[in-house]
């Protein structure tokens, strides 16, 4: 039986789809594509900003300590929901690491995952990232609920949601840094 050019093309397309969807090579391509299309997140117009309302949220840090989100009250906060298996999350994490290195002592950073903390610590170690990661112990404030990841919020000192971004973004941009600088001065 001879295979036609059309059948060969279809087979090649099928193999490519399987490679992209089901192999680590595909994950690398997905990460690269997400980085390519990521742009700086937009600031929510002042009149459209929600206030977080409640700071009642408990998290467990990578070293097992309890973090009471009330400690973030009156501070500029960046909360990012992510996972080690999520290509868009992984696409933005190098930017997040650089942003954390620049602002980690000025802004409260909370990288929240539902994954096993041992696996997360191993993953971060391989990447040589030192992001402050947490697992939720109680439900996140309702206004920060998202059924998709990555999901990131930047809160001002009054708890207003200045940025609400779902999907990968360029977090180490001049635009984000200028926003954080302004929020820190307010």
Image (tube, rainbow, N blue to C red):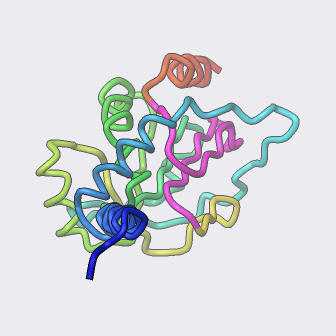
Q: Quadrant of residue 53?
A: bottom right
In the image, which residues are magenta? 148-171
Asked whether 20 or 74 is in front, the reply is: 20
Image quadrant where one finds the C terminus:
top right
- Examine the rendered structure and indicate whether residue 11 appears above or below residue 156: below
Residue that lies at the very extreme toward the front in this rendered image? 1
Q: Is residue 65 left or right of residue 150?
A: left
Q: Nearer the viewer, residue 154 or 33?
A: 33
- Residue 133 at least partly seen: yes
131 in relation to 66, above or below:
above
Q: Tell me the quarter of the picture where residue 35 sits.
A: top left
Does 104 sit left or right of 79 as displayed? left
Magenta segment: does it hold 149?
yes
**Rendered residue at 44%/40% (across/down):** 108
Q: Is residue 85 visible?
A: no
- The quarter of the picture where the N terminus appears is bottom left
The answer to which of 154 and 72 lies nearer the viewer is: 154
In percent of width and height, residue 7 lies at: 39, 70
What residue is drawn where x is 81% and y is 32%? 46
Residue for point 24% across, 56% down: 25
Residue 153: give x, y in percent of width and height: 58, 46
């Amino acid at each position: 039986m001879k295979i036609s050019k059309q059948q060969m093309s279809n087979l090649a397309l099928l193999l490519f789809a399987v490679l992209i969807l089901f192999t680590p090579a595909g994950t690398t391509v997905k990460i690269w594509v997400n980085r390519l299309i990521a742009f700086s997140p937009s600031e929510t117009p002042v009149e459209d900003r929600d206030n977080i309302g409640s700071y009642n949220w408990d998290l467990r840090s990578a070293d097992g300590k309890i973090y009471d989100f009330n400690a973030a009250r009156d501070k500029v906060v960046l909360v990012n929901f992510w996972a080690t298996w999520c290509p868009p999350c992984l696409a933005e994490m190098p930017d997040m690491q650089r942003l954390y290195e620049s602002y980690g002592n000025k802004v409260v950073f909370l990288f929240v995952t539902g994954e096993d903390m041992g696996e997360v610590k191993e993953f971060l170690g391989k990447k040589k990232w030192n992001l402050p990661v947490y697992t939720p112990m109680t439900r996140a404030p309702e206004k920060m609920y998202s059924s998709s990841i990555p999901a990131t919020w930047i809160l001002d000192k009054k708890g207003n949601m200045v940025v609400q971004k779902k999907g990968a973004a360029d977090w180490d941009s001049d635009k984000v840094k200028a926003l954080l600088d302004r929020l820190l001065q307010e």
